[in-house]
Amino acid sequence: MKLREISVPVTSLHGVGESTAKLFSHLNIFTVGDLLSYWPRSFDDRTKYVPLKDFQHGKVNTVAKVVAHEWFGYGNMRTLKVIIEDFSARAELVCFNRPFLEKSLAVGFSVRVNGSFSMRYGNIQSSAFEAESIPSETALELEADFAKTKSTQKYSDYFSSKKILAVYPLTAGLSQTAIRKAVARAIKEYAKGISDEIPEEIIAKHKLMHKAECITAMHIPKTMQEAERARITLIFEELYQFQIQIGMRSLAHRGKLPDDSIFASSSSILEEAALSRENTNGAPDSDSAKAIIEACFLDGLSPRQKKVLESLLFELTIDQKKVIAEMNADIDRSYDLKKPYAMARLLQGDVGSGKTLVAFFACLRVIDYGGQCAMLAPTELLARQHAENAAKLLQNAGVSLAFLTGNIKAAGRNLLLTELKNGNIQLVIGTHALFSHNVQYKDLRLAVIDEQHRFGVLQRNAILEKGRRAADTAETGYITPNLLMMSATPIPQTLALSVFGDLDISVIKSMPSGRLPIKTHLTKQGSEENVYRYVRAELQQGRQAYFVYPLIEQGDTDEDRGNSLKSAEQMYEFLSKKIFPEYKIALIHSKIEENEQREIMSQFNQNKIQILVATSVVEVGVDVPNATCMVIEHAERFGLAALHQLRGRVGRSSLQSHCFLIYSEKLTEDGKSRLKALFESNDGFFIAEEDLRLRGPGEVLGVQQSGYLTLSIADPVRDEAIMNVARTEAFEYIRRTHPGA
Ligand code: ADP
Ligand code: MG
């Protein structure tokens, strides 16, 4: 039986009653399977002798004598202090809420002590310790030997026969001992019958443990090495299964396994062609690669794509062209009816690199084939902006467009839904409303998800599902729509490979030409005047500015300082009355009504408003090229990715832009690192790596709600090496068992 399949309730274990079971339920432990997969947080190695004087080297683990009792505090608060002494030093055990130790640790007793000690008020002290009395003969023997030999060998021997104890995350009312007892019981009764979840030959090849042995070693290890081997086995198993899932998903979706390396998967047929040509004609300049991309790009354009290209006022960057050509090949393949295929692509490009346009080109291709497209954005503000851009760019090329959000009222909405269903609308742009259940398509063949990290995997599937259902009724049978996910928060390579391992990845590195890198300035709170002066100079040149605050309104007080944080509302008043009375200023945040938001954005776009005071609602997507100043107050309150995105709102034209990060005196170490990363770099990829380093993968990906990673013991970043092996083995296995994969 697999570990997770052991579904007998914990109460079936001897010694686990209803009350313990209730406590277990707080830890999501209901079955014996749950209990056995409740992994220890750490281990308490009691096999290693550490005398009191070495308390700084780790947990003390020694034999000592109780020399005195002291009490402090009054009444109910009276607390016992047990003074102990081993041959190396004297120390205090502070027995908070454990008055009963007065008896079990009586003066004169010999005790075995284990705990974390630190120096407090000149004494070595611990309040987190375990202590139990031992026969005084044992203690005397150890002492005598030490007196004779001056060696602590006997102590070491004594402890080497002791145990390594698992330390579990707890919940109120539950003790380590209670968990350990229940786990020991469960292992005794069930471990033998637990089956392996990795093929035998892989276990042998990588010297992993068998599952039964592994579970035992994980909870009750004989040595720390054994515990480590068990941990690695579990990590491998988890990642192996994860990669099997990725492989199978890719197989189902695209009829093939993902490429084995991230570099291979991000390079396209085009790049390969360019490379091979470089090799043959001996001219290894990237110009030839560029020439090939240009040629492929131009050759392959469909009628509507051509038309839009001709209407553009600027040249596409080489990376934009490359990605368009890559997607064209994918889309063509998805319309080749001989073999089911759908694009599944993650497009990563820094803020302002021009991803929207690339997505529009993919839509145009699908529309030329007669299919429908849906473009999904996380905020109404961004969806509307995309819709407005689409109207400007695409309508001349004969694309029928619609805009759909939760706020579109009944009458218009019904008409729109009918038109979508009968295929008269070719591109619909909107928010979550796009996958509400009454939205139906005639032939959805491309779903574009902008700022994909804002959506969960369920939502991504929901929209694909709509296309599947539509296709089921079509003659062509079972079709999965093409999927394009876009993100300006690049996913570091390690994660891209592991978490989005079933996707092809395209990267836009080149920025539109003529852009100047944004200058980032760090300013301490208190010197805002300087920033305001700087911004004024820009406004006088006809430019615009954003001021961003962490709060909408006053109220939340900062506990540490007793100060309140500046809010958007309060600063709107202040900036408009006191600092910039001669300019038009508007306030925008999520509590302002949609219609008003739209009006404000439209006016800001036309430079009828010069300053926008905002919260992080402007974080995603907002695109006003004439805005050159981004001022973020209380910058330390924002995450790294958010700050980078906010900064990306400026620097969107050939004008020099500035980002001012105003921070408070009391910066945490992390806060400092974040601001430093921003100050040093404009590169979203670097920032993403930093973010990952500072916050860990779960946080970065918003894993919990997105459901991408449901890893319990593995960490895709820390365990990258294991991930790679697991991936190779998993794909190997799929190839063996699915001929043609
Ligand atoms: P992001 O990648 O952050 O989504 P956008 O798609 O919003 O970036 O593009 C940012 C701005 O750059 C838009 O105003 C867009 O019109 C403009 N843009 C896109 N491609 C180019 C290009 N090749 N040259 C000049 N400007 C471009
Ligand atoms: Mg964008």
Image (cartoon, rainbow, N blue to C red):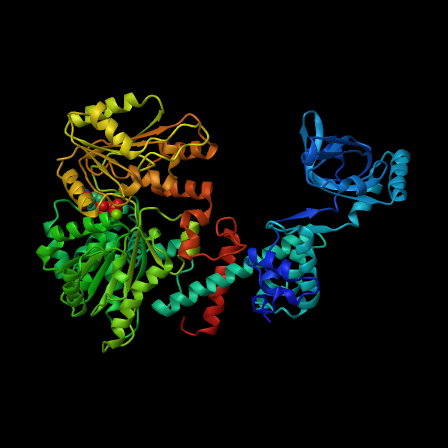
Relative to 471, say whether 624 is above or below.
above
Image quarter for residue 364? bottom left
How many marks the image carries: the answer is 0
Q: Residue at x 29, y 70 (%)?
A: 468
Residue 641 locus on image (x, y percent) = 36, 42
Relative to 378, say whether 248 is above or below.
below
Relative to 270, say whether 341 is above or below.
below
Q: Nearer the viewer, residue 264 or 710?
A: 710
Quadrant of the rendering where the C terminus is positioned? bottom left
Image quarter for residue 213? bottom right
Quadrant of the rendering where the N terminus is positioned? bottom right
Residue 116 locus on image (x, y percent) = 68, 38
Name of the residue lying farthest toward the front: 75
Residue 111 located left or right of residue 378:
right
Q: Residue at x 25, y 60 (%)?
A: 434
Residue 129 locus on image (x, y percent) = 70, 41
Q: Residue at x 66, y 54 (%)?
A: 227
Q: Nearer the viewer, residue 242 or 707?
A: 707
Residue 620 located left or right of residue 16:
left
Image quarter for residue 153? top right
Residue 27 shows in this picture: no
Residue 367 locus on image (x, y percent) = 17, 63
Residue 431 shows in this picture: yes
Residue 201 located left or right of residue 738:
right
